[in-house]
Structures are given as structure tokens and as C-alpha cells.
Image (cartoon, grey):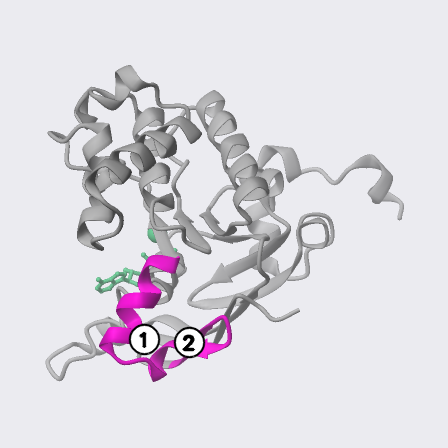
Amino acid sequence: MQPLLKVENLVKHYGAGRSARSKDKLAALDGVSLSVLPKTTTALVGESGSGKSTLALCIACLEHPTSGSISFEGIDLASLDENQLRLLRPQIQLVFQDPASSLNPRWTALEIVSEPFFVQRRYSKPDRAVRALRLLDRVAISRKMAARSACELSGGQKQRLAIARALALEPKLIILDEALSALDCSVQAQISNLLLELQASLGLTYLFITHDFGMAAHLADQIAVMDRGRVVESGSAENVLYSPNHEATRALLAATPRFSEPPAELVHA
Ligand SMILES: Nc1ncnc2c1ncn2[C@@H]1O[C@H](COP(=O)(O)OP(=O)(O)O)[C@@H](O)[C@H]1O
Ligand SMILES: [Mg+2]
């Protein structure tokens, strides 16, 4: 099966300008390769500063990689002109950790989910309202809440709203960058179940970025582990969780209570 997303040898230097000191020239991405199959969830796990968000921004065309390639449905993003990119961008949506930074607090939930329709000039005005309400319904935001401004919503409701907005333009790939990390455990569990439901009904592909192996274990088919700007290990969730090869993976697992002890049946295997 052809991957939906294929990243090859991606390098990203920040502050590589002439005046930058050598320590600022360290690569945020130092040759990342990653493949994501359609309709699956790949968890990208790594400690803070390992380059996860930089990779997300490059895939969503919000940062330009220094070198390497990203292809989406077999098409190299670097080969697209501005018009072609404008058509492609809605297919890849990014949901961030902090919804407050991406949702206008004074807008109502309904206005926020409708915005992508206005920006992309999709559908007639009455159609937009119908579609927006349907999206809010999908993420369990009631009609009553739809009329409230974003600042009145709880953290979990804001993240549901951010997910509804990400769905508006019918994307194929959703990148969730620590999207559940700031939420309480019970809210995390509810929203991760919502993500699984949406994936099953809409055929979505997720790149789920987290520093938490527990979340990765719950959601992912595949796990890729990042360390210092590289993917150092990747494979099926089961293999990475229960027979990790790389020391960075083992260190992250050791910091996750559920995985710090191997399951009894594997101890003597
Ligand atoms: N806009 C930026 N300018 C300069 N350096 C950056 C920028 N964004 C990230 N970095 C650096 O790139 C590295 C990777 O960061 P990031 O991709 O945010 O990692 P993660 O999301 O895994 O925590 C870090 O060393 C970080 O300081
Ligand atoms: Mg990050």
C-alpha cells in the first residue's frame, strides 16, 4: 500500500543566517525519515526538544525544510507551485496543545468551525451553518454551547472545537501536536475515544505527537521515536513498546509507569 505521507531525510536548521552563532545552527531536524499509511495512527514520541513540532510544521507546510523531501499521496510537496499548495494544504490539518492560542476567544464555537468555509469560499451561506452544526454535533458540542464564545468553554470543549474545525475541510491527515497533553486524564480518555470514532467513520490518518507512551499505546498502530532531530526507532506499537531497540526508547519507557516494568509473560521470553 502506498503511504499517505512519506518523509525522507528531512533536515531543518533554524537561525542558519550568516550572523547566527554556531550553537544556533544545530539542526532541529537532522535527517528524519518516516512513512505513514492511510487510515492508520502513527504516534511520534520523543522528549521535549527532539524536533517533533518542527517536523509537524514542515509537514503542514508552515515551515520550509532546509533539505530532504516530503511527499503526500506520492506527490513531492516541493514540486508544487503556490496554487497547487493552496489546494493541498486543507488536506493536512494541525491541532496544537494550547487551543487558546489558535481559537479566537471572542468568537462563538459556531463562528470558529465555520471560518474555514469562509476562508476557502466553500458552500453557500445556509449550507455553511448546517455543516458547522453537524461538525459540532460530531464532537459532542451541543447547540447551546455552539452559541457560546470560545473563552466560556472548558479545556476539553476547546480541544473538541479545535478538532471540529480541523475536520471542516475534510482533511486526510490530522497532526495532533500534544493536543491532549494539557488535559486531565478522564478528558484525555474521552477525546482519544472520540478520535478513534472519527477515524473509523471518516477514514482519517493521524500523526499523534506526544511525549507520553501511555497515550501512544492507547491510540497508535505504529510508533516512531524521535531523539535529537532523528527518528531513531519505528515499528508496530507492540514491538516498540514491548521490545524497544534504542536507548532513547527505553529511557522514555522507563519514565512511563505503565511500561517501566515489562509484562510478566515477557520477562522469561
Ligand atoms: N522557531 C525556532 N527558532 C529556533 N529554534 C527553534 C525554533 N523552534 C524550535 N527550535 C529548536 O529546535 C529544536 C526542536 O524543537 P521542537 O521541534 O519544538 O521540539 P519538540 O516539539 O520535540 O519539543 C529545539 O532545540 C528548539 O529549541
Ligand atoms: Mg513540541
Residue 89 part of the magenta segment: yes
On the image, the x and y values in percent for residue 45 come to 50, 52
Q: Is residue 165 left or right of 232 when viewed as pictured?
A: left
Q: Is residue 63 above or below residue 122?
A: below
| Mark closest to the chain's N terminus, 2 or 1 | 2
Segment colored magenta? 68-91
Residue of label 2: 10
Amino acid on which the number 1 mark rests in the picture: Pro
Under tag 2, what secondary structure? strand
Residue of label 1: 65
Query: In this rendering, does residue 101 appear at all?
Result: yes
Asked which quadrant contains residue 201, the reply is top right
Q: Is mark 1 within 8 Å of ligand 1?
A: no
Q: Is residue 230 left or right of 145 when viewed as pictured?
A: right
Is 154 or 224 nearer to us in this picture?
154
Is 152 or 169 nearer to us in this picture?
169
Tag 2 near tag 1, CB within 8 Å: yes
Who's the residue at 30% across and 35% down the image? Answer: 132
Who's the residue at 27% across and 18% down the image? Answer: 145
